[in-house]
Amino acid sequence: MSVALRIATRQSPLALWQTEHVAALLRGHHPGLDIRLVPLSTRGDQVLDRSLAAIGGKGLFLKELEEAMLDGRADIAVHSMKDVPMTPDEPFEIAAILRRADPFDAFVSNRYATLEDLPQGARVGTSSLRRQAQLRARRADLVLSDLRGNVNTRLRKLDEDEFDAIVLACAGLDRLGMHARIRQRLTAPAFLPAAAQGAIGIERVKGRNDLDAMLATLHDADTAVCADAERAMNRRLQGSCQVPIAAYCTLDEDSLHLSGLVGRADDGHCVRADGYGSARDPDALGQRVAEALIARGANALLGR
């Protein structure tokens, strides 16, 4: 390993917080470790005039960070796991997943305490098709609009009265010290998050085994097994973070419970499925729940 551990990161305040958090944990386990951040801008950060779904492609928030690892500018990269493609491109892999923070979505409004309190025809901002599908399933009267940008930008648009409410990830608000902005947590089973939402992942190039012992000190096995089940379901559905697919898995001793949802953003029609399985084989559980969703019409909702 090089003298300094170089960590590639996006430049948004939340991404930098997550990377600094990883760096602090690593320094705690390895005193004296020299860590240097390599801040980069990704395509997902640069193109803000279109929805993520319209931009298309995989790894909108990863490519530039991965290029930095390939050309030797960085050793590892830190990501929100919900942004990581269900099958990472070669030659990369996720080497560690940190303990999951709050996995759920946050209803944020300056005037209304809950989603149910919104008046007819209220304006709600979110760039996520998954969130749009579930919002329309509960409140077909709402006017939903794309909302891009970092957390501060989205909150500013709310504060400037462009929206009556917006929906963000609880974890992001918590990490930025903005927990007070959360008016209502949209929790399971009624409202399901994105696969692995709330978890931070550390990516490296395959073969960098010199990093494994260091990164293993940050890995949380319970979070990883739940994330594996959620991502396996999404992978079987050929989904990504830009499609209306939701998944949430919990662990009870050696048993997993996985809830999955596929929706249609334009009318809120959703299908759901649940399954139980062993923590020793999260992939099998994810595939089984995906098959149940397909049997209930998921492919049609996904336009296939």
Image: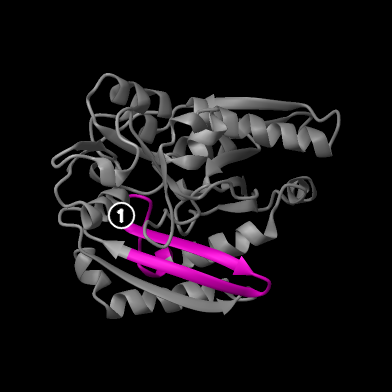
The quarter holding residue 183 reads top left
Residue 11 seen anywhere in this rendered image of the structure: no
Q: Is residue 257 left or right of residue 73?
A: left
Callout 1 amino acid: Val
Q: Quadrant of the C terminus?
A: bottom left
Residue designated by label 1: 243
Give the residue furthest to the right. Answer: 31
Question: What residue do we see at 74% from left, 37% from top?
Answer: 25
- At horizontal 37% and vertical 78% (from top left) the residue drawn is 291
The total number of labels drawn is 1
Residues 181 and 49: in front is 181
Point out the image quarter for the N terminus: top right
- What is the x, y in percent for residue 130? 31, 53
For the point 47% across and 26% down, the residue is: 12
User: Does 117 sit above or below residue 297?
Assistant: above
State the residue at coordinates (54%, 41%). Answer: 79
Q: Is residue 243 magenta?
A: yes
x then y, percent, for residue 78: 58, 39
Side (left or right) of 249 relative to 120? right
Residue 17 point in image, percent of width and height: 58, 29
Note whether residue 161 is visible: yes
The residue stretch that appears in magenta: 234-261
- Note whether 46 is above or below 194 in the view shown: above
Give the class, few, some or many, for how many residues have Cα within 10 Å of label 1's Cα (few <14, many ≥20).
Answer: many
Label 1: element kind: loop
Which residue appears farthest toward the top when viewing the image? 160
98 or 178, which is in the foreground?
178
With 173 as the anchor, is 1 left or right in this view? right
| Quadrant in the rendering for residue 161 | top left
In magenta segment, residue 111: no
Where residue 5 sits in the image (x, y, percent)? 72, 32
